[in-house]
Each structure stands twice: as structure tokens, then as C-alpha cells.
Amino acid sequence: MYKVLIVDDEPLIREGLRTIVEWEENGFAVVGVAADGRDALAKAADLEPDLMVVDIRMPGMSGLDLMGAIREKFASAPRFLVLSGHADFEYARQAMAMQADGYILKPVEEDELISALVRIKRTLDEQRAGDVRPPVHDWGRERTAISLLTGEGDRPPKEAMEAFRFGEPPYEAVLIRLQSRGEIDSATYTLIRNRLSDSFEASDKGIVFSLDPYVGLVLAGGDAGLEAAYREIRRACAEAEVDFAAVAGGAVARPEELNRSFRSARDAMKNRFLMDGDRLYRASEAEALAPGAGQAAAPSSDDAASGEKLLLALDIGSGEAAAAWVRETGEAMRASGRSEQEIKAGFARSFTQALAKLEQSRPDVRERSRAFAAEVPKLYEEYRFSGLLSRLTQLAGEMADAFRSYDGDKQVRKMIELIRRNYAENLKLESLAELFGYNSSYLGKLFKNTTGEPFNTYLDKVRIERAKELLEQGMKVYQVAERVGYSNVDYFHVKFRKYVGDSPSSYRKK
């Protein structure tokens, strides 16, 4: 695997670049991110990346300045892939003059990034092919293990294979991916690797290897070896105060077949977002976590209706309804086969849209809406599905508490306020009854007894009054119908004539 350092001053861009493609499938591993040029310059010395993906415009030190500094400081400079949000020929010219391997405009398209990675990997492979074959005495057990696991590079010589063999078959590869909401430094990787080496290599029970972004084990002895591995992985990660995802790739009879076990574990690791914590998965278990895995899931037509439920739950201050929406929506997206990035983006979009609508309809909560909107991007820090739902459930509850604006008055009063703020949404008595925790029949009677009108009649009148205002401003009839909540313009005509006694077109001409 070739090591990649991502450099961008925008947190969302950095996280998006991490997840937009399967780096490992393309021969790369993201070993770190940097928030600006100076941060990248410092990290490059420790991480020694083969490729740096660099934003061209950053505060302090630009991407071009960073490229120049890297080339001056290091004898063997990495390859560079330059990103920019500005379609500026001069930037592209300067980047290419500094021998950048590509120039991609933001927002980055997955296919374009993959094409660039394929091209850059070919260049790196050609560079590596020029290396001198290491002598036999350089073939330690870890180098031999990596060669057998990946199937890449030179084949281990006979002497190295003889020194590699240990224990009794079957053999199995276990991949460990360290996880945290923040960055994991190299010292943490070293600590965990050393603890595993003390447990396995000293007693000849296994071989520890590093293959970015993984720490891994080659084990012998079947299930008993896996049970011991889990205990040691758990203990080492607890000592380092970091979480982990671990997958065993399946047993093989001979060390020469370890590539099959490694590939199986690596493929299953793609589902790590859906894995529960504190356990070691078999590859078959991990692969079964994602229904429809490998099939891109398009946004559902129900997404808009789902977002309306969140808006209404927050607007009435119902923490229970908002939490239920988070759980139901999360499970629906998972069951549809959506990727980690698609799930996070779906939640971010729903919360952002709900907060924007609340800010428009309720000036009294504007500051709180904006404060909560600043919290939404933090959901991208979650590396596990269960952790994401837990964080969003808590956030939704805090929002509902902050937006609750009643002092014990009747539920009908809250319904009236809700209608007047959200008349353009798809409001239904049954949905509101569920949010308020009432039987819909009872809530309908309560509403009519208080207002003197059925729920639907009251909603229609609010919409028609707003429609009259918009028509008086000269807006076209079909635009008004859509603006006040009628998707069918003919139905709007019927309702308008019923309550006004005239057609919308005639009223507009008056």
C-alpha cells in the first residue's frame, strides 16, 4: 500500500476525501490528514507519504508553497495531487510546472479521483520496480508475511519461507483497524504493535505486521488462536485508550494461501462502520452486516417526507418523536444498503434543512438554530453506526428541548402555531397525533371543539389566506399553489373557489 497524506483547511473536505473512494482497493492507505501547509510539512517528516493530496488555497502556507517546501526539505519527495475550488488556469500552470501528478477541481468527483489514483499508482509501481531486490538476510518474518498476504512484490525465497513457518495449520490473517473520533498518532500504533508482539511473537504464537492502515496478525491453530487474539487486541487497545475494528479472514491450510484470507478480511473491513464494538468478526459475519452491499443506493422518494417528520418533531419540542425519527431513519438507510458516507450525508441534509426552516419560520429560535447547525458536521467524526445514532439521538433531544416554546397550555394551541409556521408542509392529523402522543380521533375532536373547525378546514383556510397574499403580489397561480402546500394546481383551484368564491386567476386580476 502507498501512504497518502490529505491536506485541506476545510474539515468537511478532509473527511469527505477520506471516504469518497475505497483507497485500499486502489492501492493506497490514508495515513494522516493536515489542516494547513505548516501542519502538513511537520507530519510529512513522520509519516513519509508516497502521495500528498493538497488543496491549493490554504491560509498561511498555500499548496504551491507546501510543494516547494517539501521538495527542498526531503531528498525523496512524494507525488502530488492538487485540488482547487477555483477553475484558474494560472494555478493549474504553476502546479504542473512543479511536477504535480494531477489537478482536480472541487467538488471532487469519485471517478476523476480514482482515475488519478490509478495513474499515480502506475508511476509509483514503476519507481518501486527499479529498486534492487533485497538479499535473503533482509527477509524477516514480517516482510515474508506481508509478501504472502498481499501477493505483491518479490516472492519470498526458500530460506525465508522456512524461517516463517510456525505452529500448526490452519493459518489465518487478522486485520485490526484502530478507530477514534480524532486522529491516531504513530505512537499509539507503535504501542499496540509492541503489546501484540510481546504476546504473540515472543511465544511463537503468531506474527505481527503493519500494513497501513492496519496492524495485523498471522495466526496458527484455528479458533483457539482467534480467542487469544481477541483478548490481546482488546487489552492492547484499552491500554492505548483507542477503539478498534477487527476481522479474521478465514483459515487456510498453507502459508502460501494467506493471500486469500487477507483479501477476505480486507473486503469485509469495508463494513467496519456497521460493526459493533468490542469483538472480533469473522469475514462472513462482517460481510452480512450490509444488505445490498456493493450496490449504490439512490435517495428514496420518502426522504422528503422523513425530513418533514423531523422538522415537526423539533418544532413542537418532542424529544421522543425526534429520537424515534433518528432510529427509524438510520435503520431504513442501513437496510437499503447505503454506504457510510451516504448515511452521514443523509442525516446531515435532514438536520440542516430542518434547522433552516425553523430559523425562517421562528425568529425566536434563530440563534439556537444556527448554534445547532454548527454541531451537525461533527456527526462525520463518528466511525461506527451505533455511535452515530447515539450522537444524533442526543443532539435531536437537545434541539427539541431548546425549541419547546409552550408553558403548559393546551395542545391545540401548539397545533395552531405549528400549522401557521408549517402550512406548506405535508401536514396530516394522523402524523401530528403520533407526534403529540394522542389518538388521532380524540385529537381531531379536541381541535374542533377548541377552534370550531375541523383540522383540515383550518389548515386549508390558513393556506388560502397566504395564497391570497401571494396572488396580490403578482405571483403566478401554479407557483402560489406549490408555495402554500398544494402539489396539484387543479385541487388548489377547487379549494380557493370554495373559500374565496372566485378562481385564483380572477382574484389575481382584481
Image (cartoon, rainbow, N blue to C red):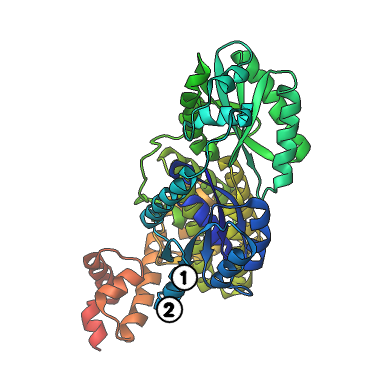
User: In which image quadrant can residue 460 be found?
Assistant: bottom left
| CA neighbours of label 1 inside 10 A, class few (<14), some (14 to 19), many (20+) | many
Query: On screen, 181 above or below 228?
Result: below
For the residue marked with disc 1, what is the amino acid?
Answer: Ala
Return the residue nearer the eye: 201 or 498: 201
| Residue carrying label 1 | 95
Return the residue nearer the eye: 327 or 271: 271
**Residue 383 on image: x %, y %:** 59, 45
Q: Could one spot residue 316 in this view of the protein?
A: no
In this picture, residue 297 sits left or right of residue 218: left
In this picture, residue 250 sits left or right of residue 486: right
Q: Residue at x 38, y 39 (%)?
A: 294
Q: Could one spot residue 28 in this view of the protein?
A: yes
Return the residue nearer the eye: 196 or 462: 196
| Residue carrying label 2 | 90
User: In which image quadrant can residue 337 be found?
Assistant: top left
The disc at residue 295 is none
Q: State which tag comes first along the sequence, 1 or 2.
A: 2
Residue with the most extreme bottom position: 510
Query: On screen, 83 above or below 396?
Result: below
**Residue 169 on image: x %, y %:** 56, 12
